[in-house]
Image: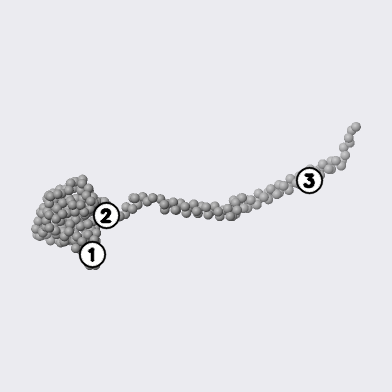
Amino acid sequence: MEKKFKFSDSKTATKAIYGAVIAILCITAIVVGIVAANNRNNDDGKLPGIEDGDSNNNNNNNNNNNDNDGDNNNNKPQNPDDDKDEKTTFNSPVSGEVYREHSPEIPVYSPTLEEWRVHSGMDIYTEEGADVFAAASGEVVSVYTDPLMGRTVIISHDDNIKTVYSNLSDKDVVSVGQFVNQGEKIGNVGDSAIVEIADESHLHFEMLVNDKTVNPLNYISEESKKTSLGIDSEDAA
């Protein structure tokens, strides 16, 4: 037996379709609203899903890490090369009296030559045969007889400094290549400097920095100047 189609059934199906469409539109509107809200949060500079408290915690962790890095740097062992600012200290090579100072520009009178001439070193009165000591630790780089200044020893030190000891005797002189410590004997005062033969027994002492003559008194320690040369800078001031 055939079923007859009823118009009422068609209206019911249409209503169901309309209801489904409306429901889909509502769900779509809700989803769009949620997406728009998240976009606004992103525009404010906040990452979705991260609260302000979490952000602050991250900042604090970063600061702590930086502090720890600083502590680690402080705990790193010091490089020995970082402390190389210490200057070499020098002592007077003999005990005596300075009677002719370093004067590379203003001429001083030479009793031997009977003329005025510049003086590249410092002459220290002391008895002939007196021990001469290394003003600082270093390597003996030259031992020779100068035609004018006599028996001479040159020692090389740190900071490109050299000390020169002239008018020595031939007795007990050190050798080239020998390393000497500060205060170690390197020779004896002699009478071998022809250009200073008329002077009393003395040591002719020079200092060179970068191969340029300098005043030894500017490098000899205050204590050594006072005890070995009788020079008290405080009294002079």
- Callout 3 secondary element: helix
Crowd class of label 3 (few under 14; some 14 to 19; many from 20; radius 10 Å): few
The mark closer to the camera, 3 or 1, is 1
Q: Which residue is mark 2?
A: 88
* Residue 51 percent across, percent down from the top left: 60, 53
Find out whether the residues at labels 3 and 1 contact each other: C-beta distance under 8 Å.
no
Crowd class of label 1 (few under 14; some 14 to 19; many from 20; radius 10 Å): few
Q: Residue visible at 22% across and 67% down?
A: 236
Q: Residue visible at 19% across and 46% down?
A: 176
Please tell me the numbered disc located at residue 181.
Answer: none
Q: Residue visible at 35% across and 52% down?
A: 82
Q: Which residue is mark 1?
A: 233
* Residue 132 percent across, percent down from the top left: 17, 54
* Comes first in the chain, label 3 or label 1: 3
Q: Which residue is mark 3?
A: 19
Q: Amino acid at mark 2?
A: Thr
Crowd class of label 2 (few under 14; some 14 to 19; many from 20; radius 10 Å): some
The image quadrant where one finds the N terminus is: top right
* Comes first in the chain, label 2 or label 3: 3
The mark closer to the camera, 2 or 3, is 2
Q: Residue visible at 27% across and 52% down?
A: 159
Q: Can see residue 150?
A: no
Q: Can see residue 192?
A: yes
Residue situated in front as seen by the camera: 8 or 80: 80
- Which image quadrant is residue 19 in? top right
- Callout 1 secondary element: helix
Q: Amino acid at mark 3?
A: Gly
How far apart are the two marked residues, 2 and 1, measured between alpha carbons?
20 Å
Q: How is the image coloured?
A: one colour
